Image: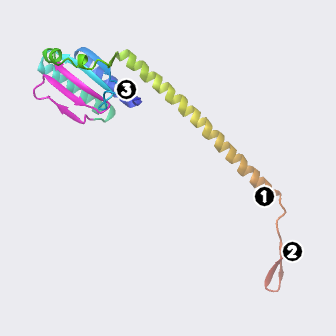
Amino acid sequence: MPSTESYQLLLAAAAACEDKKAEDIRILALDPSESGLTDYFLICNGTNDRQNVAITDEIELRLKREFGTYPNSVEGRREGEWILMDYVDFIVHVFSAEKRAFYGLERMRKSATTISVADLSAELKALIATTRQKTAETTAGLKKVAAKKAAGKKARAKKTATKKPATTRSTGGTTKPGK
């Protein structure tokens, strides 16, 4: 399962696509048994090559600014017909309408599940809630352990304080325990 940061990055990339008026934005959750490369494809298209470049520029700028993350690689930016951005956990494909229809990534990935931005956002919220619950449980467990340790130390200190201290008496240069 991807991390909360992966979901946040993917949602921010999809929002950047929307802001630059990308068309037919889709997120494909890839079948792990068929794709060892990535977890998701974010696919969209622009109306022309210039818009495609503007979409990828916005994605890159937003993810850099908000998360300090850069793509591992970017291909096709010069031509602008099909631009691919690899963010490891997801890959962004920005097509011209003609290239998207010709290559048909959605058709090639039949086992992939199309998910909406709203569904992905709900998954992120659920993951955050689960993480918070686990953190709270871990914190409570650590507090119990710390409380037990403190109680043990207190009991040992009390036990040591109630013992009669040993006294010593001097016998001409050597020290012997007193009675």
Label 2 with label 3: CB-CB less than 8 Å: no
Q: Nearer the viewer, residue 176 or 1?
A: 1
Instruction: Report, in whole angstroms, how far the alpha carbon at label 2 lies from the one at label 1.
Output: 20 Å
Give the x, y percent position of residue 150: 69, 47
At label 1, the amino acid type is Thr
Q: Which residues make up the magenta segment?
A: 70-95
Locate the C terminus and report the quarter of the image it occupies.
bottom right
Residue position marked by numbered label 3 in the rendering: 7
Determine if residue 44 is in view.
yes
Choose between 178 and 32: the one closer to the eye. Answer: 32
Image spot of residue 12 (x, y percent):
32, 24
Residue type, mark 2 in image: Gly
* 138 up-or-down from 152: above or below: above
Is tag 2's residue or tag 3's residue first in the polypeptide sequence? 3
* Magenta stretch: includes residue 75: yes
Q: Quadrant of the N terminus?
A: top left
Front disc: 2 or 3: 3
Residue 178 — which label?
Answer: 2
Secondary structure beneath dot 2 equals: loop
Q: Note whether 165 is above or below 99 in the view shown.
A: below
Residue where numbered disc 1 is placed: 160
The quarter of the picture where residue 138 lies is top right
